[in-house]
């Protein structure tokens, strides 16, 4: 919902037109449980089957739906009883097909839970990680599980909520009336414009607060790299210096100057990616220069040290586990590799939070762009894999992060796409509490 009155009007009318065939034949055909759920999800983001009302109360349902509407993201939630009307096999893809709207779909079936998404809205990896994060061993209550899933999905999903959530009725007569009322939607569009303006101002204020946090950390990184350059005992004209060394030195200086210029031009948190990417390039140039001066070949291009990118490029990989988390392999500098081998804590980068100074991976999503600039060039799945189970990790699994360019991207979603989506693109992850079934597991994947 941008400042686009005519696209908004057109979207509403298209959505109403798409609803007509569903409602026109609805009275004549016998509904299945999924038909009822799909029809309800076209009208609003949360559906609770009457047989599953003990899982989620009316007030909890309304609160969850309101949060999704406020966020303006195409996130759909269905709470269903475990009975013959809802066979587990292919349940998620069948629900998506019958609803016919691009988005993220989460289903609580009895005590089981799983989710899937159209690839244009959220990647397979993002859905898998998010499902895993809300499925602790032993299960949990529906309200808490759905709250946590929706929190993560609203952070990561691309696109806008469907226009049909504006309140179209399930009764064919009322739908026809709404089509007529659509001629008056220009007035409603003006109201929507005012609401979106307030939302935009609120979002801009939040972005500026996040940028102020990042500026402190990035300025420390730029200063540290500048001090490295000051300590560097190299002159382009010194005896033994060759063109390759001079090129490395120039790249290091360009990285420093580029980082300063990018930070001065930063207006949004995502702009910080360019700063840390420039610093990473500069530090690799310094490592190459040091190797050439020692008569060695330049080192391979590796990610920065996971614990603190100011340590420079990593030299090896080591096993490490955050407190209470699973062990994983992380790229580390030589000094941190030695600390881990001796059973000591690595020299992790800490940042200031309301809870005091904590490691950056426990500081929340504000530091995603900072970390993404350092690590995105080494593969979109690297950093989320390193950070799985941490506060920052769940925020770095967006489809945009999976691009080698970082967090940018062309957002889409929430559109009425019919039922001809490619269900063969749906992954087969079975997330612990998943439903199982004939398709090898009802799991988070791409439609």
Image (cartoon, rainbow, N blue to C red):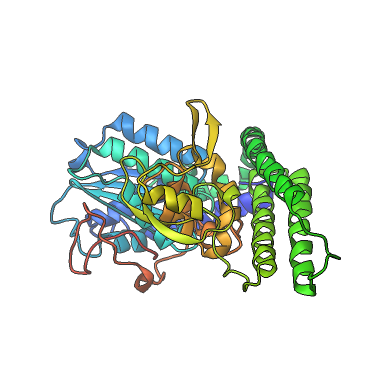
Who's the residue at 22% across and 57% down the image?
A: 32
Image spot of residue 296 (x, y percent): 62, 72
Asked whether 125 or 231 is in front, the reply is 231
Residue 385 percent location from the top left of the image: 41, 56
Q: Residue at x 55, y 31 (%)?
A: 352
Residue extending furthest right? 237
Q: Position of residue 183 (x, y in %)?
A: 61, 47
Residue drawn at x 49%, y 47% as measured from the top left: 307
Residue 240 horizontal side relative to residue 309, left or right: right
Q: Where 153 falls versus 126 (above or below)? A: above
Q: Is residue 260 left or right of residue 120?
A: right
13 relative position to 88: left or right: right
Residue 177 visible in rendering: no
**Image location of residue 40, percent across then percent down:** 35, 48
Count of residue discs: 0
Residue drawn at x 18%, y 45% is 111
What is the residue that sits farthest to the left in this orientation?
Answer: 84
Q: Quadrant of the C terminus?
A: bottom left
| Residue 441 visible in image | yes
Say which of 178 and 153 sits in front. Answer: 153
Picture quadrant of residue 206: top right
Residue 177, placed above or below residue 334: above
Q: Is residue 364 left or right of residue 33?
A: right
């Amino acid at each position: 919902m941008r400042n686009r009155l005519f696209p908004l009007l057109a979207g509403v009318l298209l959505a109403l037109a798409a609803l007509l065939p569903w409602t026109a034949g609805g009275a004549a055909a016998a509904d299945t449980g999924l038909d009822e759920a799909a029809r309800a999800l076209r009208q609003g983001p949360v559906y609770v089957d009457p047989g599953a009302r003990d899982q989620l109360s009316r007030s909890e349902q309304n609160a969850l739906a309101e949060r999704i509407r406020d966020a303006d993201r195409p996130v759909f939630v269905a709470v269903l009883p475990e009975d013959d009307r809802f066979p587990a096999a292919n349940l998620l893809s069948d629900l998506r097909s019958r609803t016919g709207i691009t988005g993220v779909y989460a289903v609580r079936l009895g005590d089981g839970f799983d989710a899937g998404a159209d690839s244009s809205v959220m990647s397979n990896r993002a859905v898998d990680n998010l499902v895993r994060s809300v499925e602790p061993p032993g299960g949990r209550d529906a309200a808490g599980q759905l709250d946590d899933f929706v929190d993560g999905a609203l952070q990561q999903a691309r696109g806008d909520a469907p226009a049909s959530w504006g309140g179209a009725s399930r009764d064919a007569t009322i739908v026809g009336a709404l089509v007529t009322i659509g001629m008056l939607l220009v007035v409603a569009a003006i109201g929507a414009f005012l609401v979106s303006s307030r939302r935009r101002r609120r979002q801009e204020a939040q972005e500026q607060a996040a940028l102020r946090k990042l500026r402190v950390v990035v300025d420390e990184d730029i200063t540290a790299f500048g001090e490295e350059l000051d300590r560097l005992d190299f002159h382009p004209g010194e005896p033994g210096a060759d063109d390759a060394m001079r090129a490395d030195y120039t790249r290091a200086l360009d990285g420093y100057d580029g980082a300063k210029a990018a930070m001065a031009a930063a207006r949004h948190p995502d702009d910080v990616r360019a700063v840390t990417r420039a610093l990473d390039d500069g530090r690799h140039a310094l490592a190459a220069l040091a190797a050439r001066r020692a008569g060695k070949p330049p080192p391979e291009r590796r990610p920065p040290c996971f614990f603190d990118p100011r340590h420079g490029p990593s030299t090896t990989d080591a096993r490490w586990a955050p407190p209470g988390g699973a062990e994983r392999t992380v790229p580390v500098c030589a000094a941190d590799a030695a600390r881990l081998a001796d059973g000591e804590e690595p020299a992790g980068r800490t940042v200031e939070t309301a809870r005091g100074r904590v490691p950056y991976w426990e500081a929340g999503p504000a530091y995603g762009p900072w970390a993404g600039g350092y690590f995105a060039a080494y593969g979109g799945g690297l950093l989320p894999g390193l950070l799985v189970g941490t506060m920052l990790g769940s925020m770095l699994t967006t489809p945009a992060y999976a691009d080698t360019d970082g967090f940018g991207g062309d957002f889409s979603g929430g559109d009425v796409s019919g039922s001809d989506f490619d269900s063969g693109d749906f992954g087969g992850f079975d997330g612990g509490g998943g439903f199982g079934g004939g398709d090898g597991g009802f799991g988070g994947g791409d439609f």
